[in-house]
Image: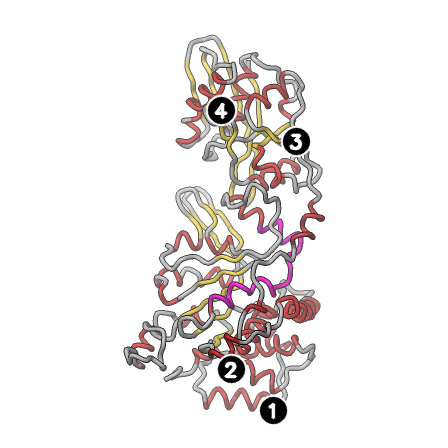
Amino acid sequence: MLIKIYGSAIHGVSAQTITIEVNVDTGGVGYHLVGLPDNAIKESSYRISAALKNVGYKIPGKKITINMAPADLRKEGAAYDLSIAIGILAASDQILAENIQDYIIMGELSLDGTLQPVKGVLPIAIQAREEGFKGIILPKQNTREAAIVNNLDVFAAENIKEVIDFFNEGKPLEKIEIDTRKEFQEKINDFPFDFSEVKGQETAKRAMEVAAAGGHNIILIGPPGSGKTMLAKRVPSILPPLSLKEALETTKIHSVAGKMGTETSLMTVRPFRAPHHTISDVALVGGGGYPQPGEISLAHNGVLFLDEMPEFKRTVLEVMRQPLEDREVTISRAKFTVNYPASFMLVASMNPSPSGFFPDDPNNTSSVYEMQRYMNKLSGPLLDRIDIHIEVQKVEFEQLAERRKGEKSEDIRKRVLVAREIQRERYKDLKISYNAQIGPKEIEQYCNLDETSFSLIKTAMEKLNLSARAYDRILKVARTIADLEESENILSYHVSEAIQYRSLDREFWNG
């Protein structure tokens, strides 16, 4: 008897329905699995055999042929255990299968028949709804994630016996329902860190506000213990809240990477990713034999924090150039190409020298030469993509001991939201959301300077030895500062502040 049962395969951040054809006949004995399965799927026969035996069923001693169509698409992982097992039982007449074609069935089997969670459930559920399936049957740990997709019945199972009884005896499975919008609104402002906890550093906090308002990449330069990491961790708390569309995009990526918790259904706050400096280029941008999203894709719609940036390998930093410009990553293989979104805000930090204390080194272990050599670990093209460079000074004891709390993230965020709304309205007819994305054409149109401002930036270029690449960056940042003040025109003091945020463009920085 031939039975067709449906599963799903992940390709990038989307899913493709897989038809699993199971044929059982009496013309011999054997177990044949075809359709480009990987080793994890080939080993499923052992897991399925033990699981069925432990719940009172068995793999029949007949010729079993299983085809996973389309046969030219490579399938991977143990997520097909449940669908193959149910297909074998239905094809050998051990259970009824009247409406089995109405469901996508996914799950990994343990030897005792219990179900283990699988990756990529959200894109699988979205594809199931688009193709008109009645429902999806999943391990219980995955169901909250799938239940955010409306117009699709999501059923939870803890072991294969529950799924068998659902088809064979009509026993109901637990149906999971979630009010997506309610859950999204409840947790949208749930942040673990707040800017009110940062003592001093008013200049750096202002730079963070400007960066958040315009979506600008920022690098913090300062000695150890000055609060660079503390400031960076609080950036998500002042960024605009995720829209529901952005939340779904972000959740899909984390779902494919298997980073969603069992109690989480939808990501409600912007991600903050802080990889260690020993990370490889593949782990950062994504890839591998079976491509997976990297850290820059996991930071999509959020923040990527590179602590001690010069300590990262040069090759790792350089592979970020194209994603920073195009806001997506393309991973090419001989037979296919995968695109992962990577629109993130880069926040980086670094010490001014190997010892960390130049030019105020108490042990005199640093020199101008060492500082310059340390700075040269960052290439010009990479720094070209970082709009704001801010020096973070050592915090004095009086500031640390002060009991008065700083300004709350909530108050800073209100100003950021006003600036972002101005930008959204300004660029509504363009494929641009905020100032950091504008190019030379938009700079010429929206960043006009009066005579005083033009004279100021000309003087700065000449006197401070600013590089040519700093010009456009200064105009972008000045446009954001003007938006924060709800000013239609860029004024001279907006330009003056923007010039202060180009520390690394000075020929003899800090020398």
The tag on residue 135 is 3
Give me the C-alpha separation between circle 1 and circle 3.
65 Å
Under mark 2, the amino acid is Gln
- Residue 384 at what x, y percent from top left? 46, 72
Under mark 3, the amino acid is Gly
Sequence-first disc among 2 and 1: 1
Q: Nearer the viewer, residue 204 or 210?
A: 204
The residue lying at 47 percent from left, 66 percent from top is: 229
Element at badge 1? helix
Judged left or right of residue 420, residue 380 is: left
The tag on residue 67 is 4
Q: Quadrant of the N terminus?
A: top right
Sequence-first disc among 4 and 1: 4
Front disc: 2 or 1: 2
Quick check: marks 2 and 4 in contact, CB under 8 Å?
A: no
Q: Which residue is mark 2?
A: 500
Give me the C-alpha separation between circle 3 and circle 2.
57 Å
Q: Nearer the viewer, residue 77 or 31?
A: 77
Badge 3, how many Cα within 10 Å: few under 14, some, many 20+?
some
Q: Main secondary structure of the magenta part?
A: helix
Under mark 1, the amino acid is Thr
Sequence-first disc among 2 and 4: 4
Give me the C-alpha separation between circle 4 and circle 1.
73 Å
- Residue 234 at what x, y percent from top left? 55, 64
The residue lying at 46 percent from left, 34 percent from top is: 77
Badge 4, how many Cα within 10 Å: few under 14, some, many 20+?
many
200 part of magenta stretch: no
Q: For the magenta stretch, what is the residue range?
A: 229-250
The residue lying at 55 percent from left, 71 percent from top is: 208
The tag on residue 452 is 1
